[in-house]
Image: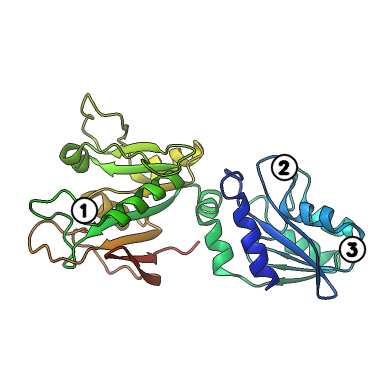
Amino acid sequence: MSLQRALELAERGRATAHPNPVVGAVLVRESEVVGEGWHERPGSPHAEVNAIEAAGERARGATLYVTQEPCSHHGRTPPCVDAVLAAGIARVVTGSLDPHPDHGGGLERLSAAGVETELVDSFEARQQNEAWRTWVGQGRPFVTYKVAVTLDGRVTVPGSRWISGEESRRLVHELRAAADAVAVGMGTVRADAPRLDARDVDAPRQPRRLAFGRRPLPEDSDLELLAGPLDRELARLAAEGVQSLLLEGGPTLATAFLEAGLVDKLLVFVAPLVGGDGPRFLADLDAPIPLFRLNARPVGEDILLTAYIHEP
């Protein structure tokens, strides 16, 4: 329960911690919660430090539950490992390891110093920071491919602009508002002239709006053209701070990303109708692609299928 509480606390920093990960921490001593904390914003104390400060002397001999292992590097703030050791914490239970190649190793340092450590390896803890983990661990954005389809997999319906319902379309705008960048291919640009912005939802910031392709953009397009190889363009976006990319392109772009192994997560909105004609959401693939953690839930009259290709 204490780790679950730490996960809940971590979410309090969702709107303010970026580009840092969200992290929550709970200190428990003799079955009593003595301190709680979360990371609020870049440059501010980390979750562990906030929990230790809340606990005061009661942190000595306590167990720290934290969603990600305490950091061991000196950045804008001192290493959390040092704060844990100075507070006299006896045991640390963490839900995930730090994937950063230079900043991880916190549990090892604590264990070497005599602190009892335990890694729970919680998928929920890793999922909380799925974009950040891919960004720091692989040097590219976390890519989510979103598509609306009919029951027979078509991405167009004759005589209708929309496939999915109003609730699904609103959710897509929420996804855009949460993403660092949104992208389509040139086929979608020519067919739909998409804006790709987040509308009619709470959007403190708009995503970068991108088009992958080699042809020039129409003169009236406000999108940013990326014409190089996909892996290089993603590396460049990551270097510019883009942690998450929502891919909304058609079959050509989606297939190219999948064949290159660059899609991490699928969001498929399935509408309650049979198209009967028109392009499907993917072209033929060279080989099957296994999916993990498949989940289905209703969104209005549609069904949203969520699955991972690469777990965070």
- Which residue is denoted by mark 3 in the rendering? 58
Q: Circle 3 sits in a helix, a strand or a loop, which is it? A: helix
* Marks 2 and 3, the one that precedes in the sequence: 2
Q: Are marks 3 and 1 in contact (CB under 8 Å)?
A: no
- Answer with mark 3 or mark 1, whichever residue precedes in sequence: 3
Query: Which type of secondary structure does the marked residue at label 2 adopt?
Result: loop
Q: Which mark is residue 251?
A: 1
Of labels 2 and 1, the one closer to you? 2
Q: Residue at x 70, y 39 (%)?
A: 43
Outermost residue on the right side: it is: 57
Q: Residues under labels 3 and 1: Cα distance?
A: 58 Å
Residue at 51 percent across and 39 percent down: it is 241
279 vs 260, left or right, is: left
* Mark 2, residue position: 44
Q: Amino acid at mark 2?
A: Ser
Q: Amino acid at mark 1?
A: Pro
